[in-house]
């Protein structure tokens, strides 16, 4: 059989980094092929080359047995290769039907709205996906947006679908739907290449897996003939302990940060948080579980002073802090790392140094009179780079050129480095490779031992059980009581996440 895609001896260097070195990749038609590797290993670069976004310095690309030179993403799509990026290229104010029609020459611009919707409905049906053609893209969930993006690419004749960490932003249920879709496409002879950090996902959905390490190829393996722990050690290049637990809770039981009956309004004027009670103690990690969009983000933003608390009361060490500004809260030691690395968190054009001072430019230690003291700022930046092993360790290189995992570490490092009393973080390990996840856990565990009160919003229940001392679940703006992670089962958390009670035996209470 002729491979659907073959990349031969691909090399790509960016200033100072050999992102891909002599990579050989072969993917057969109808195969689901995972690409695995640490942050910065060169996965996105390799796939961007296949999608026509980057040009390799050397090497060849063969599609269905023909040598091609891909000049642009449009050109790659003509050759049958389409990539789904993490930031969807959809036009949000338009409907599903209009988005599908965009740039599709078969659907004429003078089509009536009805006809447009009909042809979109046909296409959607062809792939057996659930989507309403009349719905405005803005109202879709992330999972739906992703399906729409996939349909668009497929509809333009794509035979090889590349997905870059497609489940990083999906709920577990949405991820399962995506796996089902990929398997269905595979049966229809389409090929999928999936970049992912989730080893379980590789085992569940992929036929083959190619591992990259520091720009080089480790090898391609059949998932049926390997295991999660083998993949982990091949990826990292050494043995790996994925079950290590954090230090036990040694704090006092007095609440430090306390929210009483607080309500918060969301962006759409909706009641995002309704009467939530929360106690956070020093020296503990409290995780909030739940399907994204149930008010977790608003709750964190409210506690960090980024969103107004419309009723109820928040206290820190018994002092009322309900209406304090972000800056006042920061000065009291409450620090928050955002969900969105590039939106709210970091400025992509700036280097590490400038991103570090971004938030603290008003701090006295930086000022020398009127001017910023660049020497002490650079010293601090160098310290952060070393302490948290940020790669590459170049202080002035735009951070948008760093890999996702390193950006995430930088964002957390910026907050943690200040020895805050309270650390609030949303999805601190999203998009990270297993080594970076461990690094982030160790950062948090160290803070916990120092006595920081840590509040995390997380999705993965296995991770929550491993990292957190207590866990509460958010569902439709309501926050459950917090349970000790040692005393609640994953299934019980799943029930709470779906809006049910904890379990049958609790019904009497
Ligand atoms: N446009 C660019 N300019 C300069 N350097 C880049 C560019 N894109 C990537 N790099 C560098 O190339 C290396 C590989 O990056 P790449 O984004 O391919 O990694 P990755 O495996 O996708 O990582 P992650 O899992 O974090 O997404 C990194 O060191 C990165 O900093
Ligand atoms: Mg990447």
Image (cartoon, grey):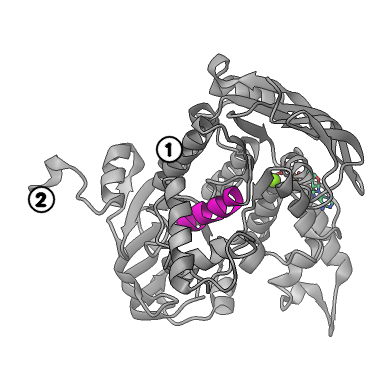
The answer, for residue 329, to whether it is visible in the render is yes
Give percent across and percent down for residue 444.
56, 48
At horizontal 43% and vertical 37% (from top left) the residue drawn is 462
Judging depth in this view, the residue of 239 and 404 nearest the camera is 404
Judging depth in this view, the residue of 285 and 46 nearest the camera is 46
Task: Classify 250 as above or below 346.
Answer: above
Judging depth in this view, the residue of 59 and 202 nearest the camera is 59
Left-right relation of 64 to 146? right
Q: Main secondary structure of the magenta part?
A: helix
Which structural element holds mark 1?
helix
Label 2 sits on residue: 509
The answer, for residue 421, to whether it is visible in the render is no
Give percent across and percent down for residue 292.
42, 57
Residue 381 badge? none
Q: Earlier in the sequence, mark 1 or mark 2?
A: 1
Q: How busy is the neighbourhood of tag 1: few (under 14 within 10 Å), some, or many (20 plus)?
A: few
Task: Classify 120 as above or below 223.
Answer: below
Which structural element holds mark 2?
loop
Judging depth in this view, the residue of 124 and 241 nearest the camera is 124
Label 1 sits on residue: 462
Quadrant holding the N terminus:
top right
Q: Nearer the viewer, mark 1 or mark 2?
A: 1
The boundaries of the magenta stretch are 142-155
């Amino acid at each position: 059989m002729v491979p659907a895609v073959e990349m031969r001896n691909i090399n790509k260097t960016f200033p100072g980094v050999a992102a891909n070195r002599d990579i050989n990749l072969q993917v057969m038609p109808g195969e689901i092929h995972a690409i695995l590797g640490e942050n910065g290993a060169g996965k996105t670069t390799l796939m961007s080359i296949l999608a026509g976004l980057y040009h390799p310095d050397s090497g060849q690309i063969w599609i269905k047995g023909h040598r091609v030179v891909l000049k642009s993403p449009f050109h790659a799509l003509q050759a049958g290769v389409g990539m789904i990026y993490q930031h969807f290229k959809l036009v949000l104010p338009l409907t599903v039907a209009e988005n599908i029609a965009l740039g599709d020459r078969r659907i004429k611009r003078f089509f009536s709205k009805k006809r447009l919707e009909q042809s979109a409905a046909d296409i959607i049906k062809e792939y057996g996906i659930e989507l309403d053609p009349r719905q405005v893209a803005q109202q879709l969930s992330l999972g739906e947006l992703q399906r729409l993006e996939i349909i668009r690419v497929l509809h333009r004749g794509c035979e090889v679908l590349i997905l870059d960490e497609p489940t990083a932003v999906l709920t577990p249920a949405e991820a399962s739907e995506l796996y089902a879709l990929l398997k269905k496409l595979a049966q229809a002879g389409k090929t999928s290449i999936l970049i992912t950090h989730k080893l379980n996902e590789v085992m569940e959905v992929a036929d083959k897996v190619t591992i990259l390490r520091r720009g080089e190829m480790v090898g391609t393996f059949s998932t049926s003939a390997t295991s999660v722990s083998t993949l982990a050690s091949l990826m990292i290049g050494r043995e790996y302990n994925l079950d290590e637990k954090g230090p036990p809770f040694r704090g006092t039981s007095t609440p430090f940060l306390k929210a009483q009956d607080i309500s918060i309004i969301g962006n759409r004027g909706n009641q995002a948080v309704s009467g939530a009670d929360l106690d956070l103690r020093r020296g503990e990690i409290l995780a909030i579980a739940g399907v994204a969009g149930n008010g977790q983000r608003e709750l964190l933003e409210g506690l960090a002073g980024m969103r107004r608390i419309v009723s109820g009361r928040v206290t820190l060490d018994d002092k009322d802090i309900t209406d304090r500004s972000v800056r006042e809260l920061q000065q009291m030691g409450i620090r928050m790392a955002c969900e969105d690395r590039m939106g709210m968190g970091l400025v992509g054009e700036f280097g590490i140094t400038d991103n570090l001072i971004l938030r603290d430019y008003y701090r006295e230690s930086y000022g020398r009179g009127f001017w910023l003291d660049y020497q002490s700022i650079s010293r601090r930046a160098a310290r952060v780079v070393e302490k948290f092993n940020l790669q590459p360790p170049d202080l002035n290189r735009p951070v948008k050129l760093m890999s996702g995992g390193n950006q995430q570490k930088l964002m957390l490092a910026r907050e943690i480095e200040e020895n805050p009393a309270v650390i609030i973080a949303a999805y601190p390990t999203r998009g990270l490779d297993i080594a970076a996840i461990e690094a982030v856990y160790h950062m948090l565990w160290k803070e916990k031992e120092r006595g920081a009160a840590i509040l995390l919003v997380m999705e993965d229940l296995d991770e929550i059980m491993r990292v957190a001392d207590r866990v509460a679940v958010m569902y439709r703006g309501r926050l459950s009581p917090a349970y000790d992670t040692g005393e609640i089962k994953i299934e019980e958390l799943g029930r709470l996440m779906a809006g049910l009670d904890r379990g049958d035996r609790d019904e009497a209470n």
